[in-house]
Image (cartoon, helix red, strand yellow):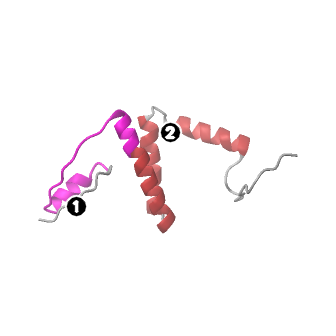
Amino acid sequence: MKEIEYNKLVRDQIPSIIESDSKECELKTVTGKEKLDYLLKKLGEESLELSESKSVEELADVQEVINAIAKELGISLEELERVRQAKAAKRGGFDKGVVLLKVKEK
């Protein structure tokens, strides 16, 4: 029997999908700091996939992980959006594509 080790956070319905394909999966449920660590690792994973595919599906995955991180940190999506808007108003967004190459003292 072929066995593949993943040790990664997956969406809640993935175990059911795997089992419906006549496969077994070994699981553990994480909470607290361990869950946050897995979410942050997942964000990196999904960001890499987005950089490779540039698809709306991968962008949605990144957003889903960000939403889960916010929830884990006790931050509402409304608060997150307020802070995002405030930072954009004060420092701007990333629309212009400005790349800071270096800063020299005068």
Q: Is residue 60 left or right of residue 15?
A: right
Query: Where in the figure is residue 58, as x and y percent of width and height?
Result: 45, 60
The amino acid at mark 2 is: Leu
Task: In this rendered view, identify the residue nearer to me: 13 or 27.
Answer: 27
Can you say which quadrant of the picture contains the N terminus? bottom left
Q: Confirm whether residue 59 shows in the render.
A: no
Question: Quick check: is 18 in the magenta stretch?
Answer: yes
Residue visible at 22% across and 61% down in the picture: 4
Q: Is residue 96 left or right of residue 56?
A: right
Mark 2 neighbour density, 10 Å: few (under 14) some (14–19) many (20 or more): some
Query: Where in the figure is residue 20, as x and y percent of width and height?
Result: 16, 59
Q: Residue furthest bottom?
A: 53
Mark 1, residue position: 4
* Relative to 65, residue 95 above or below: below
- Labelled disc at residue 70: none
Asked which quadrant contains residue 98, the reply is bottom right
Question: Quick check: is 35 in the magenta stretch?
Answer: yes
Range of the magenta residues?
Answer: 11-38
Mark 2, residue position: 77
Q: Residue furthest right?
A: 106
Secondary structure beneath dot 1 equals loop
CA separation, marks 1 and 2?
35 Å
The amino acid at mark 1 is: Ile
